[in-house]
Image (spheres, grey):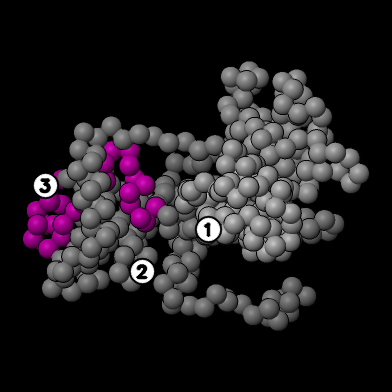
Amino acid sequence: MDIIRARPLRPHEKKKLLHLKRQHVNAVNSRHARIILLSRGGRCNRVIANEVDCSPQWVRIVIRRFNADGLLGILWYPFFNACDAPRKFFDDAREQIIEIALSPPKSLIGMQQWSLPKLHDYLIEQKIVPSISVEWLRQLLRRAKVRLRRTKTWKESTDPLFEQKRRAIRRLYRHKPKDGRRLCVDEFGPLRLQPRSGHCYACKGKRRVKRIPANYDRGKEMRHFLAFYDLETGRLDGLVTKRKTAVQWLDFLKWVRKQYPMSERLHIVSDNYPTRFTAEVIAWVMANKIRFYFTPTNASWLNRIESHFTALKNFAMRPSDYHRFEEIEQTIKSYLAWHNGNRPISLQSWREHQRVQK
């Protein structure tokens, strides 16, 4: 009767069994995991039965289920059982529900996205489960960490030298050059005088959500923020300009060059905007120990400064309703001062704020 042994374990199965063995809430899964692990350890079924406090027949049943169906054959979750009713559906039905929820709805129901009622009706119509409530379906998907998420756009690069440029930039990120410093530069903007919506804490009653006026006239005047990010120190800084031609770009490079000693070569990651390639810019760059690493076309995500621009946009520009460009520039400088550790988070004490409000 002891010829039944658990089959060899796959790496993910062994990891899951060790996790189940240490469970205190679900004693059934803990016992089943111990049975499989002891069987793989060479213990006979009677010894296993004595150690886990069950019959040898049950030990053999658990081993057979594991050999036939894997982990799904021995797992048991009490929330799939009603209080005094038999189990409605097993783990295979749960996995199938999750698989359907992750499948494209266009081919299944002819619509662009799922909703809980539509998913509920589809499961009943296809006889995946005999019955299930919308609330129970929501909880099931939530336990499996399946939720509605916003779609994102993505644009593939058409640059014929994409791999070559990508490898050069990745190599620069991994290994610091011995003779210089790594920088990422780009433009943040354009900046216009227009209301920008965002998020804020609010509660019901008198303290309502902050209102931002609607404005469809963006105006012709604008500003550009030319910034650099130092990979060695984490410094983020830049200049606000009215235009972004080759003249402003060269002035910005000269300003960046003054921030570091001439003994250091600057390795700069930048996009391939046309102003980067003028004859005057190239001549000055070659004479001032600067080397460029241009990102491929439609691949600005390779530039690490982009992630810092997202934070700058959220904390300095949203929500806002600036009426002068000086206000925008002052807010950006204030955020950069905090980011670079040049000021604490507090600009005004709470007591002073209360006194002003009164």
The earlier-in-sequence mark between 1 and 3 is 1
Q: Which mark is residue 42?
A: 1
Q: At which x and y percent is residue 189? A: 41, 49
> Can residue 205 be seen here?
yes
Label 1 Cα crowd, 10 Å radius (few <14 / some 14-19 / many 20+): few
Hey, what amino acid is under mark 2? Answer: Arg
Q: Secondary structure at mark 1?
A: loop
Residue drawn where x is 82% and y is 43% of the image:
81
Hey, what amino acid is under mark 1? Answer: Gly
Q: Which mark is residue 235?
A: 2
- The residue indicated by pointer 3 is 279
Residue drawn where x is 33% and y is 71% of the image:
233
Of badges 1 and 2, nearer the viewer stands: 1
Instruction: Tell whether label 2 touches label 3 (CB within 8 Å).
Output: no
Q: At which x and y percent is residue 84? A: 91, 44
The earlier-in-sequence mark between 3 and 2 is 2
How much space separates mark 1 and mark 2, taking CA atoms? Answer: 59 Å
How much space separates mark 1 and mark 3, taking CA atoms? Answer: 77 Å
Position of the C terminus, as image quadrant, is bottom right
Closer to us: 86 or 274 = 86
Position of 77 with respect to 161 (left or right) is right
Of badges 3 and 2, nearer the viewer stands: 2
The span shown in magenta is 278-306
Position of 289 with respect to 24 (left or right) is left
